[in-house]
Amino acid sequence: MLKGINPLLNADVLQALRAMGHGDDLIIADTNFPSDSVARQTVLGKLLRIDATAADVVKAVLSLYPLDTFVNDAAARMEIVGKPNEIPPVQKEVQKEVNAAEGKPWPMISIERYAFYERSRKAYCVIQTGERRFYGCFAFRKGVVPPDAE
């Protein structure tokens, strides 16, 4: 255990988050997402796991991970097939955690299912959660940590 670091963040996840640079994508996926096969195509090349709900994983990750302020797609959700504007409860819960982490409303964009798969294959890494609800899949683009004010 480390002080100040969410205990859900295991060593493999912390190493990946630390290694990522500005503009790299992180995928947080539910249990139904083809996480292992997609993760093999990412920069990291292996699957990471955190067995918790999508909202809990997003809260833990965003406690350390800055979102990119230079793009409009730094936070994204997989849209429901045939219902792109519908926001299921799992996505509402994650949206709440994104807003809390950023200290302001930060609306997630929606990405069509197959476009989401394509973005995922180009990501730095995939974290599969224990989330069993459908459409608990999200993409987060890493931002920067500014220098300390002098």
Image (cartoon, rainbow, N blue to C red):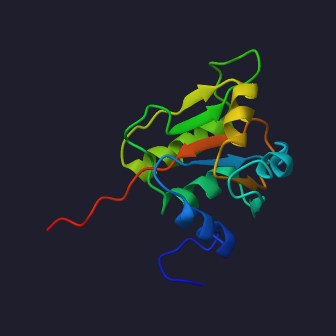
Query: Which of the pair 110/44 is nearer the observer?
Result: 44
User: Image quarter for residue 81?
Assistant: top right
What's the residue at 24%, 67% (across, down)? 148
Residue closer to the observer: 129 or 148:
148
Percent of width and height locating residue 65: 49, 58
**Vertical position of residue 86 compared to residue 132: above or below:** above
- Work out which quarter of the rendered image holds the C terminus and state it: bottom left
- Image point (76%, 26%), residue name: 114
Where is the N terminus found, in terms of image quarters? bottom right
Nearer-the-camera pick, 122 or 117: 122
**x and y, in percent, of residue 129 in the image:** 75, 55
Q: Count of labels shown? A: 0
Residue drawn 80% across and 52% down? 40
On the picture, is 55 further left or further right than 73?
right
In the current view of this chain or complex, which residue is farthest to the left? Answer: 150
The image shows residue 149 at horizontal and vertical percentages of 18, 65
Of all residues, the one furthest to the top in this rendering is: 82
Instruction: Where is residue 96? Give x, y as percent.
Output: 51, 44
Instruction: State whether residue 114 is above or below residue 145.
Output: above
Q: In the figure, 54 relative to 8: above or below?
A: above
Residue at (60%, 27%) from the top-left corner?
Answer: 110
